[in-house]
Image (tube, rainbow, N blue to C red):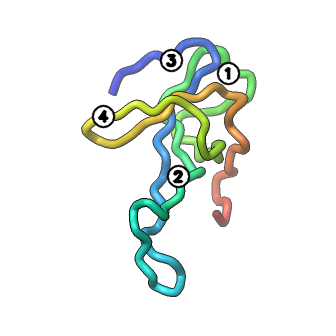
Amino acid sequence: MNINMRNDCVLVKRIPLPLATKAGIILPTRAQELPQLALVVAIGPENPENIEYHDMVLVMKFAGTRWERDDGDYYILRINELLAVLQHGSPI
């Protein structure tokens, strides 16, 4: 995908959560939470946080604008809506 983000926006793809609990109970779609872990797919030119392509980030649950595509849902967020950037090799 070739996309140019504007200003301080980032495009992320949320990483899906497991569909079952640790005890093996399968959760119905309504009970599943929106994942907070996401992969950065594109970054705008105003990037004071030095976020890079393919960084893993934590985002607010209901932040961003959803963009539906055939290959999944993407979210457009402002950099200040990112809670944390996970360090490479992080145990999460």
Q: How busy is the neighbourhood of tag 1: few (under 14 within 10 Å), some, or many (20 plus)? A: some
Instruction: Choose the circle earlier in sequence order: 4 or 3.
Output: 3
The amino acid at mark 2 is: Leu
User: Decide: marks 1, 2 in contact (CB < 8 A)?
Assistant: no
Q: Which residue is mark 1?
A: 47
Instruction: Name the spot of residue 54 as percent of width and height, x first.
Output: 52, 40
Q: Secondary structure at mark 4?
A: strand
Instruction: Choose the circle earlier in sequence order: 1 or 2.
Output: 2
Which one is closest to the eye, mark 4 or mark 3?
4
Q: Residue 34 bears which disc, if any?
A: 2
Q: 7 or 24: nearer the eye? A: 24
Give the Cα distance between marks 4 and 1. 25 Å
Which one is closest to the eye, mark 3 or mark 1?
3
Instruction: Name the spot of residue 76 as percent of width and height, x first.
Output: 52, 28
Which one is closest to the eye, mark 3 or mark 2?
2
Give the Cα distance between marks 1 and 2. 25 Å
Q: Secondary structure at mark 2?
A: loop
